[in-house]
Amino acid sequence: MTAGSNDLWPLLWQSLGETLYMVSFALLFGGVAGLLLGLALYTTRAGGLFAHRGVNAVLNVLVNIVRPIPFIIFLTAIQPLTIAVSGTSYGPRSMIFPMSLMATFATSRLVEQNLVSLDPGVVEAARAMGAGRMRIIATVIVPEALGPLILGYTFLFVGIVDMSAMGSAVSSGGLGSFAIQYGYNRFNYVVTWVTVAVIVVLVQLGQLLGNTLARRVLRR
Amino acid sequence: MAAMVSLRDVSKVYEGASGPVRAVDGVSLEIERGDVFGVIGYSGAGKSTLVRLVNGLETASSGEILVDGTPVTGRSERHLRDVRARIGFIFQQFNLFSSRTVAANIGYPLRVARWSKADREKRVAELLDFVGLTDKARQYPEQLSGGQKQRVGIARALATSPSLLLADEATSALDPETTRDVLDLLRRVNKELGVTIVVITHEMSVVSYLCHKVAVMEHGKVVESGNVYDLFAAPRQEVTRRFIGTALHDLPRPDVLARLRARHPGRLVTVAVRESSAPVLDGALRAAPGVHATVVFGGITEVGSRPLGSLTYALSGDDPQIDALLATLRRHAEVIEHDPRDEVSA
């Protein structure tokens, strides 16, 4: 794979590294924050451990406002905030904040949906044994929903890889930028296709890991 | 000594879609230490809400609830946690933690109570032995049958040695044979461990097998309560009679009577069998001159370990002699004569 006299392979591997860097931090920050926000959405629902109509309504509106914004627009819209937080407006590091933020909102709904299908009886059982609410969240709600949660996070991983490619709009680096810059802009389809292949392999590996973990947790 | 559970004019009102719903309406009950107390009612009668008021899973709208002399009403969530930790609770759907093994399910309340690992393991082993599931310790709930799951539920509820156990439709999801096993286990819990048990059910057979005392609930109110045998022997409310009918099946319904009359020419009478009347009935029937008595319907069962039921006889012979026999029987038991024409009996 070449462009003129340049060998593009080293650049591809570097771009893969940048993508992995962006995706793993966004998955970590967005995953943790999304879990907390999702738990907040779930527990403040009517009949929940921290049932509170007002808080629940505010959180719902917040999530509903942010989530439908196309990521490429969200990315550019919050750029002043990104610069303030990460000190830079370009490169892989500049992507972690907006990706984490968007991932947080996406994850929160995923988490909430998985928890809603949890049998409320197990929560009642823990309450009947005198367990505190924070303990119930940590030792009953999350463990009981762990299998579906892992599958949800696997789904999220694919979405975050997708988000990382949008960074080409703000010179973020990573596989998306690489494919646009050396493939699309130079009419070199081979570069684009090879990049696609790398992304497909990356996503497959992530999916395989998620499925395996979920199967182990669900014991089937 | 104070009652184990004491409810004074307790009500629970929900805000329903079409105005307030009085799920529990002015209930007063005293449940004595060591009792097995049944609360029976159709679904929606408020019995599940009532039992959740006792351990503070639901908050009463008004009235006062004392458990072991300690008020439950008007307490903070933190205080209620301590109350709940001292009351066992078992559920219709078992509500076991699917992410934990049988042993870890039973050990959960001990973790909540901050027991050390060694103490927890020792106690879990005792409980597994008590409910006969020692070989299932490392298995997960989905690998167990319904009856085994409820045994785990009972062991988990007993982990912290509570003096009160609340059972909410504990056998309603089980088949009859497994139901009997679980009821026998609950009997042992009461007899061997001295635990007071409150049994919520819609099955009168559960009450007759297990309970000493019973309260019948309808529309959020306790309509009748008392000793199980006395209530079965002399129910005052229609709803109670219907529940007893489901447990005994001893009284012939009108269609059954019509068939009996077609088959047997004589007079049909139903005689109530009670602990007091059972020994004298046979003698009186056998000694009656010129009257031939045939048992054609009925049933006798044990309620609170005492005989109860009724027998329907076809009596043939001369009318004066039959009348004399009926007069004798009426001195010992309640007797109903079924007449083919209502105007004759009137």
Image (cartoon, rainbow, N blue to C red):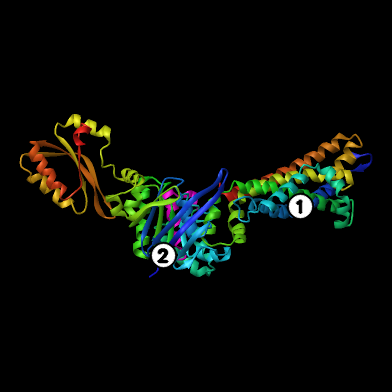
Under circle 2, the secondary element is: loop
Label 2, label 1: how far apart the Cα atoms are: 57 Å
Packing grade of label 2 (10 A; few <14, some 14-19, many >=20) is many
Q: With respect to residue B131, does B115 lie above or below? A: below
Query: Which residue is identified by label 1?
Result: A24
Of helix, strand and loop, which one carries label 1?
helix
x then y, percent, for residue B152: 45, 56
Magenta-drawn stretch contains B150: yes
In this rendering, position of residue B213 left or right of residue A188? left
Q: Which mark is residue A185?
A: none
Q: Quadrant of residue B6?
A: bottom left
Assign the magenta stretch its main secondary structure: helix
> How many numbered discs sit on the rendered protein?
2
Q: Is residue B185 above or below residue B340?
A: below
Residue bearing mark 2: B4
For the record, the magenta segment spans: B140-163
- Residue B136: tell me if it is visible: no
Identify the amino acid type marked 1. Answer: Ser
Residue A200 is situated, as x and y percent measured from the top left of the image, at 75, 40
Q: In what quadrant of the picture does the N terminus of chain A appear?
A: top right
